[in-house]
Amino acid sequence: MTIHWCGTGLSAIPGLRRLIKAGHDVTVWNRTTAKAHEAVGDLTDNIKAFDLDALGADVGVGDVVVSMLPGDWHVPVAELCIEKGANFVSSSYIAPEMRALDDAAKAAGIACVNEVGLDPGIDHLMAHNLVADYRASSDAYNASNDLSFISYCGGIPKIPNPFRYKFSWSPLGVLKALRSPSKSIRDFAEFNVARPWDAISSYQAPLPAPESFEVYPNRDSLPFMEDYKFDTDWRVKEFVRGTLRLNGWADAWADVFAEVETLSGPEGDARLKEMSDGFWAENGYDEGEPDRVVMCVALKAEKDGADVYHKTYVMDAWGDENGTAMARLVSIPVSLAIEAVMRGDIPAGVSAAPGDPKLFNAWLGEVDKLAQHLTVVDHL
C-alpha cells in the first residue's frame, strides 16, 4: 500500500516527513520537484513531477492519495481515486462537487476523507468531544436546554505588526474570503452576513492569561449542526464557526475592506491579485519568525437562564525551531487520517474529520503534543 502525497507547500511538510520517518511507502508528487527535494530530499528520493495522468498510471488499488494541492485539484484527484480503487485524503472543506462523489466512493469501497487539517479538522474533533461529553453529563443534559456553540480559529503573528496579520501563504485566498457571505445562528435565528467586517465582535479567549480577539462568522455554519450530531429538536441559541484575529485588525484593514467591496469581474480579480502580491511582499513572515495559532471551541447549555454546562477547548500554539505552528497543525492531522484509512478505521464514502470517539480522542491526544497549550476549561 503506497501513500501518494501530492503537494509540498508550506503547510504540508511536517505530516509528510512524519509518514516517511515512520517507514511508510511514500511517493512524493509536486509540480516543482526541486521544491519537493528541498523539503524532504534528506529522507527520500522517491519524488516525481505531479501530473494527473502520471499519477493515475502509478496509483494502485488500496493506495492512499493525499491532495495538498490547490483546491481546484481535489475533485479531479478524488475522481481518479474512485476510478483506480484508491483512497483519498485532503485537509480542505468538502465542496458540493466532492459531496456528490459519495455514492461512487461507497460503490468503489474507498474512503474519501476531507476536513482533517486545522480548521477544518482539529476544530471538528473538539466539537465532537464536547457534544459527546454534554450528552454523557446526566446532571446537565436535557433536550429542552438552550445551547450555544462557538468555534473560532486564527493564524496570527506571534509578534504583532501594524497590519495585525501576517501571511504564511498567498494572501489571495484571504482576500477572496472577505467577499464570501456567512450564515450562523444568533438569538435562535439565522444570522446572514454579506461581508465579514459587518459582523466583527470581541471574544475573550480563556487562555492562561485571558486575551481578547476580534472574531467574525465564516462560511456557512449551519450544516455543521448535523455534522456535530446536534439533535434536530435541540434549542440552538447560538451556533457559529468563525475566524479569529488580533485586536486592531479591523481598523488596520479598513482600507482593504473599502476597496474589496468595490471590486468585481475580471478587473476586480486582477486587482485582488495585485493586492495579494503586495501584501505577500510587505506582510509575509520573515525567515524564522514565529507564527501563532489560537483555537477556541465551546459548548454551553442553559436552563431557565442559568448555565448548566459550559466547557471550552482552548489551544495556543506557535512556531519554533522545528517550523511553523500552522504547518504542523494542518499536516500532522492529515497524516493521522492517512494512517486511519490504511487501518480501515474510516468507512467508505465522502466524510469529514471523524465523529468516532475512539478516533477523535486519540487524535486529540496527538494534537496535544503539537501545541504549547491545549486544555479544556470548565466554566462552572
Image (tube, rainbow, N blue to C red):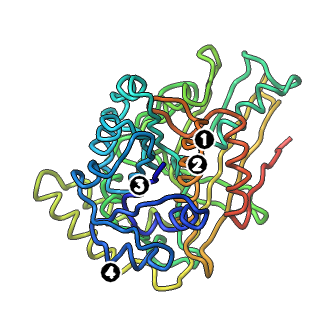
Does residue 323 sit above or below 72 in this rendering?
Answer: below
Task: Give, as a three-letter code, the residue at label 3.
Answer: His
Q: Is residue 307 left or right of residue 41?
A: right
Task: Give, as a three-letter code, the residue at label 1.
Answer: Arg
Residue 311 x/y as whole percent: 77, 42
Residue annotated with mark 2: 339
Characterize the local packing of mark 4: few (<14), some (14-19) or many (20 or more) Cα atoms within 10 angstroms: few
Q: Which is more N-terminal, label 3 or label 2? A: 3
Does residue 44 sit above or below 5 in this rendering?
Answer: below
Task: Give, as a three-letter code, the residue at label 2.
Answer: Glu
Name, please, the residue furthest toward the right: 139
**Of tags 4 and 1, which is closer to the observer?**
1
Q: Is residue 246 visible?
A: no
User: In whole angstroms, how far apart are the C-alphas of marks 2 and 1?
Assistant: 6 Å
Q: Are marks 4 and 1 in contact (CB under 8 Å)?
A: no
Residue annotated with mark 3: 4
Residue 111 x/y as whole percent: 47, 35
Q: Which is more N-terminal, label 3 or label 4? A: 3
**Of tags 4 and 2, which is closer to the observer?**
2
Say what secondary structure mark 4 lies in: helix
Q: Kindly identify the residue that appears in the image at 67 percent across and 56 percent down.
A: 367
Residue 25 x/y as whole percent: 50, 58
Characterize the local packing of mark 2: few (<14), some (14-19) or many (20 or more) Cα atoms within 10 angstroms: some
Q: Which is more N-terminal, label 2 or label 4? A: 4
Instruction: Find residue 288 and name its label.
Output: none
Q: Is residue 61 visible?
A: yes
Q: Kindly identify the residue that appears in the image at 83 percent across and 26 percent down.
A: 140
Q: Nearer the viewer, residue 78 or 256?
A: 78
Residue annotated with mark 4: 281
Task: Give, as a three-letter code, the residue at label 4.
Answer: Ala
Instruction: Find residue 343 and name its label.
Output: 1
